[in-house]
Amino acid sequence: MSLVGGIEPALPTTRPLTPNLLDLLQNSLILAHIVPHLPPSSLTQLCATNRAFRTVIKASPGVFRHLDLTQLKAAQVNLDSIDNGGEVWRNVQLDEYLTEEE
């Protein structure tokens, strides 16, 4: 190296590159291990962050497979208010296949 004005030029220091969250989530293996531990609100917040996060979350198969909806009141279904008329329907279906002699 040549000396400029008697001072040796400084070499650029190399730092190890640290991946950001988007780089980590683009790895499907890492994403598959992280998603089951995230609540639904975190997934929607990640999708709302920017287009890159939204693309990674929505385009990855199986991301929404592990959603635990038991804590969400909007996802709860009141089964008591459903009409239990299914038994009558099943009997009508059986009767359709029977002839008058049977």
Image (tube, rainbow, N blue to C red):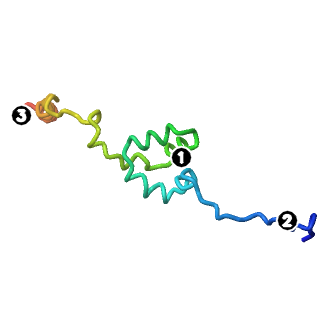
Q: Is the C-beta separation of discs 1 and 2 under 8 Å? A: no
Q: Amino acid at mark 2?
A: Pro
**Residue neighbourhood size for the residue with mark 1, other residues' Cα within 10 Å, grouped as few (<14), some (14–19), many (≥20):** many
Q: Earlier in the sequence, mark 1 or mark 3?
A: 1
Spot occupied by residue 62 in the image (x, y as percentages of width and height) = 43, 50
Residue at the disc numbered 2: 9
The residue shown at (49%, 59%) is 29
Distance between mark 2 and mark 3 Cα atoms: 105 Å
> Which residue occupies the foreground of this view, 79 or 55?
55
Residue 79 in the figure: left or right of residue 6: left
Q: Is the C-beta separation of discs 2 and 3 under 8 Å? A: no
Spot occupied by residue 92 in the image (x, y as percentages of width and height) = 13, 30
Q: Amino acid at mark 1?
A: Val
Q: Is residue 90 above or below residue 63?
A: above
Nearer the viewer's eye, disc 2 or disc 3? 2
In the rendered structure, find residue 101 and report the number of the disc placed on it: 3
Q: Is residue 33 above or below residue 63?
A: below
Q: Amino acid at mark 3?
A: Glu
Distance between mark 1 and mark 3 Cα atoms: 63 Å
Nearer the viewer's eye, disc 1 or disc 3? 1
The residue shown at (36%, 46%) is 39
Q: Quadrant of the N terminus?
A: bottom right
Residue at the disc numbered 1: 56
The residue shown at (54%, 46%) is 56
Distance between mark 1 and mark 2 Cα atoms: 43 Å
Nearer the viewer's eye, disc 1 or disc 2? 2
